[in-house]
Image (cartoon, rainbow, N blue to C red):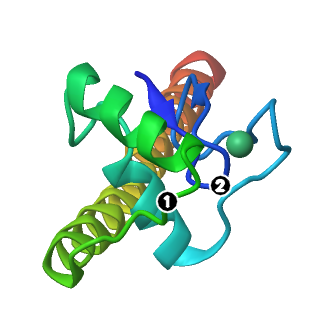
């Protein structure tokens, strides 16, 4: 993935990484949303190059509120899904662990007879 730094217009590997040129890192949902719009997640490289030139020219880049809203939803959804995924793994490993415990208990009951 490629992304453009919102502050200086340089390219960086991912949207939320610290920029090597200006040391800027997006914080908060709004800035994260802006940076995602400036990445290959939402735009192709041709457009990203245009954004980069635009910012490097010192012109402010304006985002449509509608676009930002969509990205915010995507971010929220990703975070929620990540959480659910973790819970699922936790439950799964919990059941697995219990199964082993029961097997061990069963084994000892069998051998103590
Ligand atoms: Zn930068």
Indicate the position of residue 92 as horizontal and vertical percent values: 38, 43
Is the residue under label 1 in contact with that under label 2 (CB below 8 Å)?
no
Q: Is the residue marked 2 within 8 Å of ligand 1, measured from its CB?
A: yes
> Separation of disc 2 and disc 1 at Cα?
11 Å
Above or below, comparing residue 15 to residue 59 in the picture? above
Count of numbered circles in the view: 2
Left or right relative to 54: residue 44 = left
Indicate the position of residue 9 as horizontal and vertical percent values: 57, 40
The residue under label 1 is 59
Crowding at mark 2 (Cα within 10 Å: few <14, some 14-19, many 20+): many
- The N terminus - image quarter: top left
Left or right relative to 25: residue 112 = left
Of residues 86 and 110, the one nearer the viewer is 86
Left or right relative to 63: residue 4 = right
Specify which label sits upstream in the sequence, 2 or 1.
2
- State the SS at label 2: loop
- State the SS at label 1: loop
Instruction: Tell me, yes or no, if residue 71 can be seen here.
Output: yes
The residue under label 2 is 7
Image depth: mark 2 or mark 1 in front: 1
Q: Write the residue at 62% across / 26% down.
A: 108
- The C terminus - image quarter: top right
Q: Write the residue at 35% across / 67% down.
A: 80
Crowding at mark 1 (Cα within 10 Å: few <14, some 14-19, many 20+): few
Indicate the position of residue 17 as horizontal and vertical percent values: 67, 39
Indicate the position of residue 83 as horizontal and vertical percent values: 43, 61
Instruction: Tell me, yes or no, if residue 85 can be seen here.
Output: no
């Amino acid at each position: 993935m490629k992304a453009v730094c919102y502050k200086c217009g340089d390219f960086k590997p991912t949207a939320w990484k610290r920029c090597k040129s200006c040391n800027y890192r997006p914080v908060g949902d709004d800035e994260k949303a802006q940076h995602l719009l400036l990445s290959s997640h939402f735009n192709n490289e041709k457009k990203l190059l245009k954004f980069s030139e635009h910012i490097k020219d010192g012109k402010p880049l304006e985002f449509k509120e509608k676009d930002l809203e969509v990205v915010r939803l995507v971010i929220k959804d990703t975070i929620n899904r990540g959480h659910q995924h973790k819970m699922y793994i936790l439950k799964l490993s919990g059941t697995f662990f219990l199964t082993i415990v029961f097997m061990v208990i069963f084994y000892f009951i069998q051998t103590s007879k």
